[in-house]
Image: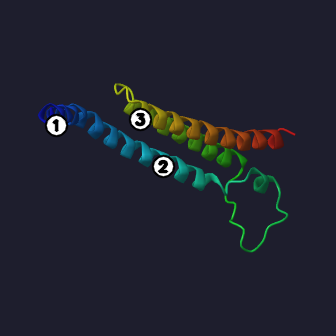
């Protein structure tokens, strides 16, 4: 009986080795994509639309605003495009791999990138409204 249990455990281990390896590779890549999404978000944090239209309330330590409204809109639009690409690449990792852990991680990355894109689009809409007053 012990031999049957040990052989069953060994077979189970061998059958699931490939799945666990694929999961580890996919999760590593998805983690890197999540980090990339946060880097994109960090780069656009100081790109505040209010600074384009208002010169008041600046301090000596405020970041310099070198972009005009058009350039800032384009920059923010590029950020949303990069976030969209990050979400799509994450989805490619789960394309032919029906693992619930990987699918959940991909959904989290897609939700993250969608949420960050929404925040950036709010900035774009603020610029558009100020510009067309």
Res 47 visible: yes
Q: Quadrant of the N terminus?
A: top left
Instruction: Say which residue appears at 23% left-offset and 35% top-offset.
Output: 18
Q: Nearer the viewer, residue 90 or 100?
A: 100
Q: Secondary structure at mark 2?
A: helix
Position of 26 compared to 18: left or right? right
Colour mode of the rendering = rainbow
Q: Nearer the viewer, residue 13 or 55?
A: 13
Query: Label 2 belongs to which residue?
Result: 36
Instruction: Say which residue appears at 32% left-offset and 42% top-offset.
Output: 25
Give x and y (percent) for residue 73: 67, 44
Query: Farthest bottom residue?
Result: 60
Give x and y (percent) for residue 2: 15, 36
Query: Label 1 belongs to which residue?
Result: 6
Q: Where, by quadrant of the figure, is residue 51 drawn?
A: bottom right
> Dot 3, how many residues are within 10 Å of its Cα: few (below 14), some (14-19), or many (20+)?
many
**Foreground: disc 3 or disc 1:** 1
Instruction: Say which residue appears at 48% left-offset and 50% top-offset.
Output: 35
- In this rendering, the answer to whether 46 lies above or below 21 is below
Position of 27 compared to 116: left or right? left
Earlier along the polypeptide chain: callout 1 or callout 2? 1
Earlier along the polypeptide chain: callout 3 or callout 1? 1
Earlier along the polypeptide chain: callout 3 or callout 2? 2
Query: Label 3 belongs to which residue?
Result: 102
Q: CA distance from mark 3 to mark 2?
A: 18 Å
Residue 23 numbered tag: none
Q: CA distance from mark 1 to mark 2?
A: 44 Å
> Dot 2, how many residues are within 10 Å of its Cα: few (below 14), some (14-19), or many (20+)?
some
């Amino acid at each position: 009986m012990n031999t049957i249990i040990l052989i069953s455990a060994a077979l189970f281990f061998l059958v699931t080795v490939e799945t666990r390896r694929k999961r580890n590779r996919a999760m590593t890549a998805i983690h890197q994509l999540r980090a990339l999404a946060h880097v994109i978000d960090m780069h656009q944090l100081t790109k505040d639309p209010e600074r384009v239209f208002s010169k008041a309330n600046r301090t000596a330590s405020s970041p310099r605003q070198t972009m005009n409204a058009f350039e800032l809109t384009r920059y923010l639009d590029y950020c949303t495009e990069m976030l969209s690409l990050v979400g799509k690449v994450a989805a490619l990792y789960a394309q032919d791999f029906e693992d619930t852990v990987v699918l959940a991680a991909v959904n989290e990355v897609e939700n993250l990138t969608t949420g960050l894109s929404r925040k950036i689009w709010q900035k774009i809409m603020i610029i558009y409204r100020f510009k067309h007053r």
